[in-house]
Image: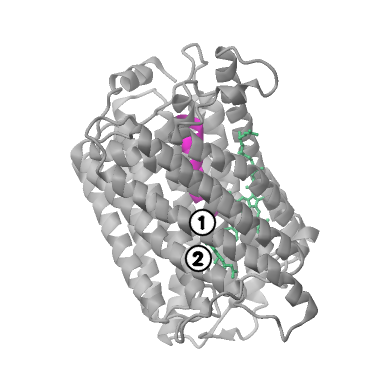
Amino acid sequence: MTDTVLAKQSEADGHRFAPQDGKLILAHVLFAFGALVIGAIAGLLQGLVRGGIVTLPAGIGYYQLLTAHGVLMALIFTTYFIFGFIWASIARTLGDLMPQVRRMAWVGFALMTIGTLLGTVLILLNQATVLYTFYAPMKASPLFYIALVHVVAGTWASAAGLFVQYRYWRRKHPGQTSPLLAFMSVATMILWIVATLGVAATILAQLLPLSLGWTERVNVMVSRTLFWYFGHPLVYFWLLPAYMCWYVVIPKVIGGRIFSDSLARLSFVLFVLFSIPVGFHHQLMEPGISPLWKFVQVVLTFMVVIPSLMTAFSLFATFELTGRERGRRGLFGWLKAMPYKDVRFFAPFMGMLIFIPAGAGGIVNASNQMNGVVHNTLWVTGHFHLTVASGVALTFFGIAYWLIPAATGRKLTPKLHRLGIVQTWVWAVGMLFMSGAMHSVGLLGSPRRTAYTTYGDNAEAVGWMPYHVVMAVGGTILFVSVVLLVINIVLLLRAPRGVEEFPLGETAPDSPAVPVWLERWGLWVGIVIVLVLFAYTVPFADMIQHAGPGAKGVVT
Ligand code: HAS
Ligand code: HEM
Ligand code: CU
């Protein structure tokens, strides 16, 4: 990191957000948690239904509930929180938002909110029971696709605002590399924009015309392929903001240093390059894609594991160096030096711990033969409740504990730290039960996305039931954690006035300079385009050339 950047950052210590920026951040974060609460009610009910403990009151379908849960959790909670955190990161490292940028951010927020409210109403009215993956031949009301278009357009407006602020900073600081968090925010947004082109294409060219009745049939393979072209980088869009916290915030919170600025940037560049041309690892069991192209994309999938391994390496290095500075010795001596009573550390740390088995499960999924065992079973549901719903969600909770007071000019108190730690433990225990049961019963063959059934008292299916009951117990514990979270947020909003810091880590003063080529975005985007064309052109052309008559839309 250059001297000027360091100087700018220390100048900014004791930093307060401009009140207008605080409002923008808070609006995003609170909306995110609103979605989480409704999503959690659906999640709780799903667990109870599958465990055979409750039946849904007439009129509510299991698929309908699952759609609400998937959309509100995976699409809405994540996206709003990410924009809140990224706006905070930009304002903290590049300076208060410029007035036109703030306007773009609010336009983005408004579009996303119109889309979310409309979409949620349609799901509640059973007009959009198409699950959060909404691919053909499932058909929703045209208004649902219009709602999705609003959400995506809103994110684009916000991303454009972010690029404006970033370009302005670079013009004002010629020859300098940008602050690490700003670099990471830009990388995340580039990944998002390239990925959302796929989902925009299937919505506008396939799903909307189908649901308006302009076309009678739809090419299902193309729709699924375009969805997963988006759906896989989507998971890294959730993950990268968590990694921003792990790389930059955590070192500061534990009183250590960022291990390497260049390594962190390189790992984000690798995510931009390799997270997009890999969607086929969600389609390994589908006919209609040749094994060669599945193989190519699985190789690329294993490439995208590398930046996560780099992240693990650099976190261990930060922890160990910090431990040694405090006189801890031995391989795991550092474990004793960590501030477990600090929720800003503890919640994300629990997320990291859980992310280790989560990632290992991902590698199982990506292995073609093993995918045959786990695909469409509850194992996969278990996998992503460890990745996005724990590794990422716990990190977001950890961020919220300091970001909410930082945005409102208040202070995180010791009592709130304690409550936050309790909430984190409850989440971890609930997830141990729920995700543990999902993984186990998935291996026994219990399918995902299915309401309670014993398949006419089939012996095997009856054997799954004890696991489903454990799942329901875990889900109930998780729901308790959400209630604790809500209580904590209300208390945070009324915490004593003061300045809560945005913990911003730094590298050691004698660190080598960051190579400027890491910031050549034109080059990286160019390589992404080449990789995408390489991985998708031939199989995509195949799907179009050998298309049958297509499928009629299905309304559940
Ligand atoms: Fe995945 C399905 C493969 C990562 C989310 N994934 C899903 C779905 C979701 C999802 C939502 O190949 C289901 C979609 C649906 O509805 O159908 N996934 C992978 C692989 C990775 C991976 C190879 N997934 C994620 C992340 C997600 C996510 C991240 C969300 C945030 N996934 C798959 C595949 C499928 C799939 C197949 C399709 C399955 C099917 O058949 O349907 C890798 O990126 C994982 C790499 C990660 C690691 C872990 C590194 C560890 C770190 C922590 C360090 C800890 C420290 C603390 C330092 C290798 C960074 C240490 C402290 C101590 C005390 C020890
Ligand atoms: C699916 C429970 C939190 C994302 C499910 C399922 C259950 C469940 C029981 C359905 C399994 C099936 O029938 O296939 C819960 C509970 C939670 C929780 C009790 C906490 C209160 C989360 C969070 C996220 C999330 C925080 C993401 C940020 C998903 C997704 C699905 C799902 C994407 C799949 C929907 C689909 O297959 O279409 N959850 N979950 N969940 N959950 Fe959660
Ligand atoms: Cu994936």
- Amino acid carrying label 1: it is Leu
Closer-to-camera residue (92/156): 92
Query: Which mark lies nearer to you, 1 or 2?
Result: 1
The reply to whether the residue tagged 1 has its Cβ within 8 angstroms of ligand 2 is yes
Q: Is residue 94 left or right of residue 100?
A: right
| First reached walking from the N terminus: tag 1 or tag 2 | 2
User: Residue tagged by mark 2?
Assistant: 43
Camera sees residue 377: no
Q: Residue at x 77, y 64 (%)?
A: 373
Residue 331 appears in which quarter of the rendering?
Answer: top right
Q: Position of residue 397 (x, y in %)?
A: 43, 45
Mark 2, Cα crowd under 10 Å, few <14 / some 14-19 / many 20+, is: many
The reply to whether the residue tagged 2 has its Cβ within 8 angstroms of ligand 2 is yes
Label 2: element kind: helix
Closer-to-camera residue (217/406): 406
The magenta region covers 235-248
Q: Position of residue 35 (x, y in %)?
A: 38, 60
Quadrant location of the N terminus? top left
- Amino acid carrying label 2: it is Gly
Where 365 sits versus 494, above or below?
below
Q: Which mark is residue 478?
A: 1
Marks 1/2 in contact by CB < 8 Å: the verdict is yes
Q: Is residue 505 left or right of residue 498?
A: right
Closer-to-camera residue (212/362): 362
Where 290 sits versus 341, above or below?
below
